[in-house]
Amino acid sequence: MRIKENPGGARYGKTLSGGHYINGKWMGEDASEKFQSLNPSNLDDVVGEFPIGGANEVDAACKAARDAFMKWKNVPAPVRGEVISKVGAVLREQKEMISRLITREIGKPLREARGEVQEAIDTAAFFQSEGRRLYGQTVPSELRNKQLETFRRPLGVCAMITAGNFPCAVPAWKIIPALLCGNTVVWKPSEDAPATAYAFLNAFRQAGLMDGVINVVYGHGPTTGQAVVDAIDRGLINKVSFTGSSQIGMKIGEVCGRNLQVPSLELGGKNPMIVMDDADLGLAVTGAIWSAYGTGGQRCTSLGNLIIHEKVADEFVERFQQEAAKLVIGDPSFNEDITYGPMIAERFMERYLQHHDMAAGTGAKCLLKGERITADNAPAGFCGNAERGLFVTPSLYDGVSIGDDLAQTEVFGPTVNVIRVASFDEAMAAANGTKYGLSSAIYTDNPQLRLRFKNEITAGMSSINNSTTGAEAHLPFGGNGWSGNGTRESGIWVIDAYTKWHCINIDDSGGLQLAQMDVEEVDTGAADSLADLVTSG
C-alpha cells in the first residue's frame, strides 16, 4: 500500500494506491491496469487506485482461504470471538477516520457515515459474545445406552460480494459472523468504495487475524465479480453472500442452485409507506422525507411508494413539498449539515435521470422533477462543486398507480411516488403490489390497523410510525421476493447462514441397535386391540 500525491483533490487528502490482499500479502500493487475510485462530490479527487482482479487472483484467494480454513475452524469459538472483539476495538479507535473516508469516497453525509461505522462496531460487539453461544443440543434417544448430539459446523470458504452504499456496515454484517462461525472469506468489495474496503480490512489485520482467513480481490462486477461466481462451479467456494441488484442476485442464485448451495441474497426494494387518515401528519411527513431522500435515496430500504389515504392526501403532499424545499444538498466533506450528498457513481445518476421516462403515458403528475445540479440551476442552500460533482435534485410524482412502471421499478435515487387510496384494504393491496418485499412502514394510531398491517404485509421488515430505513445490529435484516431469498443478515439468525448442522449418534450398548426397529414396546393395558374392535360382533 502506498500513499500518493493527489493534485486534483489535494484539499480532500492524498490518494491510496493499494493491491489485492491474499494470504496475508499485498499483490498487484504495481499492476499496469488499475481502476480509480473518484470522489463523487468532486471527480477531480482520486481517492484510491486498485488493480483489477481476475480468475487467477480469485483462485489464489480461494486456495489461501481453503488452506487457512483447516486451522481457523479449529480455533475455539470463544477465542474467535476475542479476535472479533479486537476488530471492534480497532474500528472504535478509527471511527472518525473511516467515517470521513466513507464521506469522501461515496458522498454520504458525515453523520450517516459515523452511524454506519458504529453499526460495524455494534456488530463486532454482538458477535464477540456469540462465540460462547454457538450452541448445539443433546437429544434423548429412543434406545438405551445411546446418546444423540448436534453441533454447528462452519461451511468452508465464503465469498462476499458487497455494494458501495454501505461500504463498512454491510461487509461487517457478512464477514464478522462468517468468521465467528469458523469460516474463511474471499471478499470482492464494491468498485465504488475500495479505499473504505481497505480501511475495514485493516481492522482485521491490526486485530491479529491469521493469514488467509480473509482475502480481498478488487475489481468490477462484470469481471472480478463474475470470476468469483465462476469459482463456485469449480468447487472453490462453499457459500456466497451477495448484496446488490435483484437481477444479478437471480444469476448468482442460479449458479448456486446447480451446485446445491444456498446463497444469502440481499437485493433491491420498492418499499411502501402507508399513511392513514388518523396519522400524525407532521410525524409522517418527517419520516417520509427521511425515508425517500436520506442518503440521496441510495439505500435498498429507501421509500419508493408513498401510499396515502385520500382524506389527508392533499394536505400531506402540500406539507411534504414544503419540507422538500428545505433540503440542503452539497459536498459532505466540508458541510456537515447537508441532507444528502452526491450520487455515488455516474451510472446511478444516469439511471436516476432516465427514470422520468417511465412517467410518460401514465396519469402521474410530476411535482418535483429531479435534475442534475449545475451552476445555472443550483437550488437554495446548495454547497458544492456543481460542475465536477454528481449532484441531483429530488423527484416527487403524484397520482401514480401501483401498476405503473414508476411504482414497480427500483430507481436508487431521491424519488418517491404518491399513490392515493380510499381504504386500508386498498392501501395493503398497493403495499404488497410489487415483486419486492424488503422494508415497509405505516403511520396510524389505530391498534387494529397496526395489527392487520403486521399480519398482512409481505415485507421482511416493517416499522410502525417510523421510517422504512434503519437497522440494528441484533435484528434480522432481509427481504422476500425480488428483495431476497429469505436468508437474513445480522443477529442470531445469520448464524444459520454460515453453519450447517452435524448430528452425532453415540451407541455404548455394545451391540447393533436399530432405530425404529429395536425400540422397546410399552404395554398400555388396553382392553381391546384394533383387531378386536374390527372383528367384534
Image (spheres, rainbow, N blue to C red):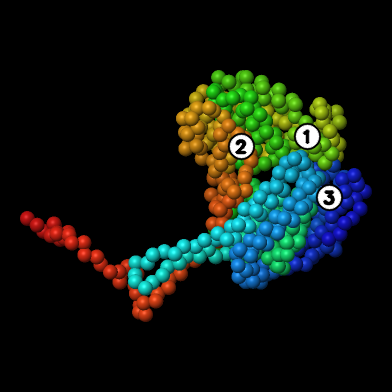
Residue 211 in view, yes or no: yes
Quadrant in which residue 87 is drawn: bottom right
Q: Are marks 3 and 1 in contact (CB under 8 Å)?
A: no
Cα–Cα gap, marks 3 and 2: 31 Å
On the image, numbered disc 2 is attached to which residue? 468
Q: Position of residue 314 (x, y in %)?
A: 61, 19
- Residue 47's label in the rendered image is 3
Q: Vertically, is 132 above or below 64?
A: above
427 and 434: which is toward the camera: 427
Name the side, left or right, on which 328 lies relative to 141.
right
Cα–Cα gap, marks 3 and 1: 21 Å
What residue occupies the far left of the structure in this picture? Answer: 537
Label 1: which secondary element: loop
Q: Amino acid at mark 1?
A: Ile
Q: Earlier in the sequence, mark 3 or mark 2?
A: 3
Q: Please identify, in this view, whether the residue under mark 3 or under mark 1 is nearer the observer.
A: 1
On the image, numbered disc 1 is attached to which residue? 338
